[in-house]
Amino acid sequence: RQRRVGRDGKEFIMYKLRTMVEHAEAETGPVLATGPADERITRVGRVLRAARIDEIPQLFNILNGTMSLVGPRPERPEFVSEFLRIPGYAERLQVKPGLTGWAQVNGEYHTSPEYKLKYDLAYIYNYSLWLDLRIITETVKVMLTRRGV
């Protein structure tokens, strides 16, 4: 479980499978996701992340209404306070966060916040059922091909 920031800047608990060693940030503090070579990620964790299986518990967040299937990915509070300095970032907090999003199918785990924001805002400004269906389809492709890890 991790605290995340959702719609209107409200914090909630997001469910995930643990893919890192215990106490991974004990010495470093919060660290943004890095690439697959991150030594804190367990062997099993690499497989789970590659197939995006570590995100499955977030279906509970969708059921309890804190997340939707598609939308900008929720970030940890420690990072949101920093990201709010990026012009336009606050607009992400006006919509419900998602299990998958336009930024996730167009980038990698370790893509910069500015890069992701570009896609998140494009999603928000161009929201439609068709775009959601395209993102879901692309997400399945990413899961099957392990692209973007």
Image (cartoon, helix red, strand yellow):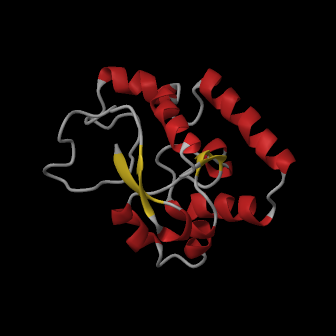
Along the viewing direction, whichever of 86 and 3 lies nearer the viewer: 3
Q: Residue furthest front?
A: 64
Question: Eyeballing the image, is 9 above or below 104?
Answer: below
Residue 115 image point, x, y percent: 59, 60
Residue drawn at 51 percent across, 37 percent down: 60
Q: Which of the 4 image quadrants contains residue 22?
A: top left
Is residue 110 or residue 60 the one in the foreground? 60
User: In this picture, is 30 found above or below 87?
Assistant: above
Residue at x 56% of width, y 64% of height: 7
Determine whether 76 is above or below 48 in the image.
below
Give the residue at the far left of this rendering. Answer: 27
- Locate the N terminus and report the quarter of the image it occupies: top left
Q: Position of residue 130 (x, y in %)?
A: 86, 46
Report whether 53 appears left or right of 69.
Answer: left
Viewer-proximal residue among 69 and 124: 69
At x 33%, y 33%, the residue is 18
| Number of dots carrying numbers | 0
Q: Position of residue 19 (x, y in %)?
A: 34, 31
Give the x, y percent position of residue 26.
15, 49
Left or right: 83 with respect to 142? left
Would you say 35 lies left or right of 93 here?
A: left
